[in-house]
Amino acid sequence: MNITYLIYALIIFALGAAGWFFYSKKSKDQFDFRKKKPLTEAEEQMYWKLVQALPQHVILTKISLPRILSSSTVEARGSITQKTLDFLVCEKDFTLVAAIDIEDKSPSGSRKRAEEAKKFALDKAGIKLIKWKSSALPTDAEILSRVLGIKPKAPALKIVPSESFNTESGAAG
């Protein structure tokens, strides 16, 4: 009787293996891969703005959080597993300066919780997270201010001596 069960088990295993082999071969033949751009239009515009405004820095795109964060607990690592950053600004030696995300629209409930978890993890690690809306990308001055804390200098005022200005005609000279 034990041999009968063994024979049935082997037959079932063989049929399962054969089915899996044919199914996996068939499904792979139906794979439809096409190349696509790695960045959205807004992300591409933002990338070039960052490169222009921060020429002494390295700009990385589409970075997963586990690539830049570590933790001793499985729960903490699990909370960041599938989360990414649109941009990471680094010094030339790859020291982290800031993380940047582009917001396309208001996040839904689950997306909002994921964004809060991302912000929490980055805050705990001491990494500044900066968000910009895709509809209002920053200027060079705004990038310098938010990323590096550099305030733009006001243009110098040209002072004209009062004796060189004719008050009657309103003309200089």
Image (tube, rainbow, N blue to C red):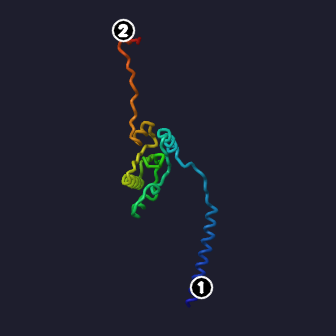
Camera-side mark, 2 or 1: 2
Q: Quadrant of residue 29?
A: bottom right
Say which residue label 2 marks: 168
Closer-to-camera residue (49/102): 49
Name the residue located 57 percent from the left edge and 85 percent from the top edge.
6
Height in image: 71 above or below 59? below
Three-letter code, disc 2: Glu
Find residue 79 and report its image quarter: bottom left
Residue 100 pos. (x, y %): 44, 47
Disc 1 marks which amino acid? Ile
Mark 1 residue crowding within 10 angstroms, few (<14) / some (14–19) / many (20+) = few
Residue at position x 38%, y 40% in the image: 149
Q: Quadrant of the C terminus?
A: top left
Q: Does residue 89 appear in this view?
A: no
Q: Nearer the viewer, residue 20 or 53?
A: 53
Q: What residue occupies the far top of the structure in this picture?
A: 168
Secondary structure of residue under mark 1: helix
Q: Which residue is the site of mark 1?
A: 7
Task: Give residue 26's position: percent from left, percent from top.
Answer: 63, 66
Percent from the top left, x then y, of residue 152? 40, 34
Say if residue 153 shows up in the picture.
yes
Label 2 – label 1 distance at C-alpha: 116 Å
Query: Mark 2 or mark 1, which has the lower sequence index?
Result: 1
Residue sitting at x 47%, y 54%: 64
Side (left or right) of 32 relative to 96: right
Q: Is residue 40 above or below residue 158?
A: below
Image coordinates of residue 42 in percent, x first then y, are 50, 43
**Secondary structure beneath label 2:** loop
